[in-house]
Amino acid sequence: MPFARRDIEAAGAGAGSGDDDSPAAKRARPEAAGARPALTRTEGAAAASVLVLFVVGIFCVLRAAPRHEFDQILRLPRSLADVRLVKDNLAVYARDYQANFILGYCSIYIFMQTFMIPGTIFMSLLAGALFGVVKGGILVVFTATAGASSCYFVSKLIGRPLVSWLWPEKLRYFQSEIAKRKEKLLNYMLFLRITPTLPNTFINMASPIVDIPFHIFFAATLIGLIPASYITVKAGRALGDLRSVRELYDFKTLVVLFLIGSVAVVPTILKRKRIYE
């Protein structure tokens, strides 16, 4: 009987292990299916940094701004007329409380870009009008990169259904293009960031869905947004002469952006040529 009992227990253990290897059991055990956390440690640290910056910025604005000026300081510009009005209202505040204003500006810009709220181009114009080309350009590139990264994290956590619903065809196209360029992904992402080939909002939301690593997304965003940010911030210095946002990206400007973006994909083209030869 002891031998029979051991045989029965061994058979039961074997059956149990067979069940554990079944597809259903693998789905029940994420580690067996090769699942990974939604955010890596690096991504979690970056997301926490962006969140801290957002909270600190809002706190600084609320603490330093006069109560009767909240509606002017926290107002989101929606047009060129709004940018001019906000610039006139905030010029003194931005000069006297520059650190607080910059932190508040960063918070608002990051919030708008994280949740795809239109109007960041007007925020970029405002930065140029208040701080000039160099300081305004650095501010815009930094906040745009932080906001894009925040949008990347949100999309990675909960954005797949929304992206698939909003841009199904564009997402399939993007996924196929990414699959072709795995070895030179940074070059391709730089090209997309520099040129208006795909909307930045779509790139921010779709990148984690098509498995673009965050370090490549971050580097391409930080570098690739510099040309467009320079154009917008420089236009903000001459805000009174600007009649329409469309003037920012006329035919000449688009050609220049595509030429700059083409430099990023030259290594990929040369490598393919050597392979074919």
Image (spheres, grey):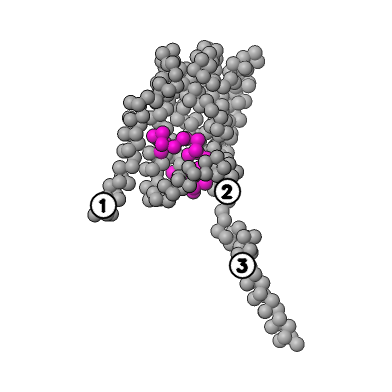
Furthest residue to the right? 1
> Of callouts 1 and 2, which one flags the residue occurring earlier in the amino acid sequence?
2
Residue that mark 2 sits on: 38
Secondary structure found at label 3: loop
Secondary structure found at label 1: helix
> Is residue 101 at least partly visible in the picture?
no
**Of marks 1 and 2, the one in the foreground:** 1
Marks 1 and 2 sit apart, C-alpha to C-alpha, by 39 Å
Q: In what quadrant of the picture does the N terminus appear?
A: bottom right
Residue that mark 1 sits on: 274
Rendered position, 24 above or below 129? below
Q: In what quadrant of the picture does the C terminus appear?
A: bottom left
> Of callouts 1 and 3, which one flags the residue occurring earlier in the amino acid sequence?
3
- Residue 203 percent across, percent down from the top left: 48, 39
Rendered position, 153 above or below 111? below
Residue depicted at x 64% and y 64%: 25
Q: In the rendered view, does 221 fall on the left or right side of 46?
A: left
Residue that mark 3 sits on: 22
Decide whether residue 179 is among the magenta residues: no
Residue depicted at x 58% and y 20%: 75
Q: In the rendered view, does 130 fall on the left or right side of 272?
A: right
Marks 1 and 3 sit apart, C-alpha to C-alpha, by 46 Å
CB atoms of marks 1 and 3 within 8 Å: no
* Amino acid beneath label 3: Ser
> Of callouts 2 and 3, which one flags the residue occurring earlier in the amino acid sequence?
3
The magenta-colored residue range is 192-216
